[in-house]
Image (cartoon, grey):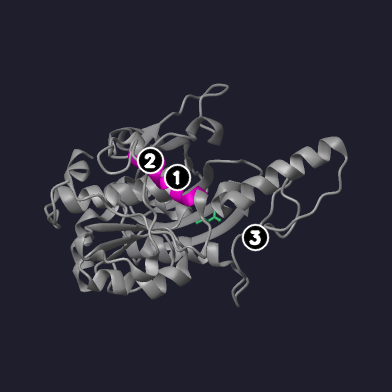
Amino acid sequence: MALLSRMTPYVLVQNPQIERPVRLLLLLELCKLRGAVGCCGDKTLKVSNLENYDFSDTDICLMSAGGTISQKWSPKIGAQGCVVIDNSSAWRYDQEVPLIVPEVNADAITGFRKKNIIANPNCSTAQLVVALKPLHDFAKIKRVVVSTYQSVSGAGKEGMDELFTQTRAVFVADPISSKKFTKRIAFNVIPHIDSFMEDGYTKEEWKVLAETKKMLDPKIRVTCTAVRVPVFIGHSESVNIEFENEITADQARDILREAPGCLVIDKHEDGGYITPVECAGEDATYISRIREDATVENGLNIWVVSDNLRKGAALNAIQIAELLLNRGLIKPKKAA
Ligand code: 2RA
């Protein structure tokens, strides 16, 4: 992160018509935590109007303003020589835009030059591929079945507010209304995230397959059920994996213990596993409950938990920026 603080201060742009204070703050918080004090840490950040901002002096734009803004602005910003790291889904499936999780496909980053845009994956995919990559390298994954348990912060501040308000309403016997989610989320689970597609899957479920294939291996077959749960921060995933080659649970545990970004907490005792409450505010992708699946030839079941606001969003974006700098792929335009 030291490199970032030597750069010209990068600008976090907010469209004045769109209020996204939480997302913006999360990015700022993370920069502060990871030591980019020279950029924005304890300083007052100037928010400029996107319409007339000149990006030609700016090295990196961390874009977290939604797909519509990104579609319109990322190419214009990229054309001014500023690299956009985009958190929306606008560019993830574009063949000319690399989709990057540094622990998984760092080498693919060089493709950013075509458009000067790099895409950050969907939160549920980011943690999944961090866990899958080292196992794929060892025993070649054939098929993955994922069930997600996604926290309400994946739906932003309004999602968090809705869980809080509804939970309180249940206790004080107030009427309960749902705006952000399609059904009551307090004391409930909802098997529906993002919009429905023609085949009956949701867009969230489709993203998991499309992004896993793009980043890890297009030959891997992936199927997913994405579920919203009444948890504020931290996505969990139950993952069933079928491999081409033999792999034992002990081998998987050893491999994952050494793998970048992974932390294995897997004791066969009460509480010997990770839950979202413990992962919130942490950078790692936690893996627990590693077991052999006796119903297939080479199968494993694992439990993957990570802070969706960090590895699933802000942290991964910062890691991409670090990757650009550490590999000398961009040179700071001005010294800070
Ligand atoms: C969600 N995956 O949890 C989305 C956010 N990117 O709703």
Badge 1 is on which residue?
26
Q: Nearer the viewer, mark 2 or mark 3?
A: 2
- Residue 25 within the segment the image draws in magenta: yes
> Which kind of residue does numbered mark 3 sit on?
His
For the question of whether residue 298 can be seen, the reply is no
> In front: mark 3 or mark 1?
1
Q: Are marks 1 and 2 in contact (CB under 8 Å)?
A: yes
Q: Position of residue 23 (x, y in %)?
A: 48, 51
In this view, the residue in front, 84 or 273, is 84
- Residue 130 or 307: which is nearer the viewer? 307
Q: CA distance from mark 1 to mark 2?
A: 6 Å
Q: Residue at x 60, y 78 (%)?
A: 198
Near mark 2 (Cα within 10 A), the count class, few <14, some 14-19 or many ≥20, is: some
- Bounds of the magenta span? 22-31
In the image, is the residue at mark 1 within 8 Å of ligand 1 by its beta carbon?
Answer: no
- Residue 30 is marked as 2
Tell me the kind of residue under disc 1.
Answer: Leu
Residue under numbered circle 3:
192
Q: Residue at the location (53% across, 45% down)?
A: 235
Instruction: Describe the element under mark 3 as helix, strand or loop.
Output: loop
**Could you say whether the residue bearing mark 2 is in a helix, strand or loop?**
helix
